[in-house]
Amino acid sequence: MSNREWHLLSRPVGWPKDEDFALVEAEMPTPGEGQVLVRNKYLSVDPYMRGRMSDAKSYVAPFELGKVMQGGAVGEVVESNAEGIAVGDHVLHFFGWREFAAVDAKTAVKVDPQAAPLSTYLGVLGMTGLTAYAGLLRTASFKEGDSVFVSGAAGAVGSQVGQIAKLKGASRVIGSAGSDEKVKLLVEEYGFDAAFNYKNGSVSEQLREAAPDGVDVYFDNVGGDHLEAAIGQLNVHGRIAICGMISVYNNTEPAPGPKNLARLIATRGRVEGLLVGDHYDLQPQFVQEVGPWVASGRLKYRETVVEGIENNLEAFLGVLRGDNTGKMIVKL
């Protein structure tokens, strides 16, 4: 059997192009001592992967040219040379963008497909869920009664941030999204108090209308005009958690910063970046609290599922375009 996998051929300049990548037929990996062979069933594509396609210094090593890329994946163990993981078990690991992966057992996390659908371990119960949980509760120091604004609110992280804030007693939750359909979803299904389509006009004006009393917490997935708008509406001692800035990921020149940063002096506002890897200690607490919310339907989620390894790249580009509602998943 062969193993199809996606390789990075050249580092994209601006928007990634098809010729920057190749779907390659490689040899089937052989698991060594302490490893398991996993047939991937679901792959994750995420905005942060765009940064790894660049060779700029960052918090994580760039993808290597001419080699298979990486990403979250969940699959079934088809061969095991490790104690504690048997053939037929399902595991979460970080060797996506391929059909089969040889994975060190010590880095694989067993998951239960009976407790929740396998795909949820890449989203609502996985890294994106923990990002939302840690970013809101720890980085942004959310407290009951806070007013919260979330950009990219219909995405995998943003949709959970807003719902967790509501479940934790937020006084008001506002979201921005890129279509009227997503705005409707935020209010009618996810329980946001207000939402707006950022394509319909000035973000600052729409946020002022949606949050006339200001915001205490801004969870940023977008950057750019959204960040500037949030600073403009930030209440005294407001907090801003910077999770992502998808609006600038494909820029070829540095984007200008917000023009109103001086307002942080008057508000004594705090801005802090967020990397989920710094918060894995919250994983048990996250699963214990969020798992029952998901099981009971109190916390809702959506997935955008793309079929086939051959469409992995298009699914990734779709995330950058904002095509997804909720978590973008590739099903093999």
Image (spheres, rainbow, N blue to C red):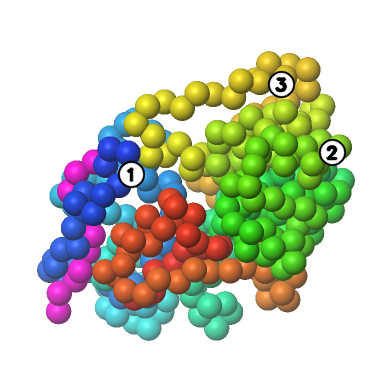
Q: Residues within 10 Å of mark 1 (few under 14, many from 20)?
A: few
Q: Can residue 157 be seen from the camera position used here? A: no
Q: Residue at x 62, y 37 (%)?
A: 226
Q: Quadrant of the C terminus?
A: bottom left
Q: Residues within 10 Å of mark 2 (few under 14, many from 20)?
A: few
Residue 89 drawn at (x, y percent) = 41, 79
Residue type at tag 3: Leu
The reply, left or right, for residue 269 in relation to residue 181 is right
Sequence-wise first label, 3 or 1: 1
Circle 2 is placed at which residue position? 212
Residue type at tag 1: Trp
The reply, left or right, for residue 76 in relation to residue 2 is right
CA separation, marks 3 and 2? 18 Å
Residue type at tag 2: Pro
Q: Residue at x 32, y 39 (%)?
A: 14
Q: Can residue 298 be seen from the camera position used here? A: yes
Q: Quadrant of the N terminus?
A: bottom left
Q: Residues within 10 Å of mark 3 (few under 14, many from 20)?
A: some
Q: Residue at x 76, y 32 (%)?
A: 233
* Callout 2: SS: loop
In front: label 3 or label 1: 1
Circle 3 is placed at which residue position? 264
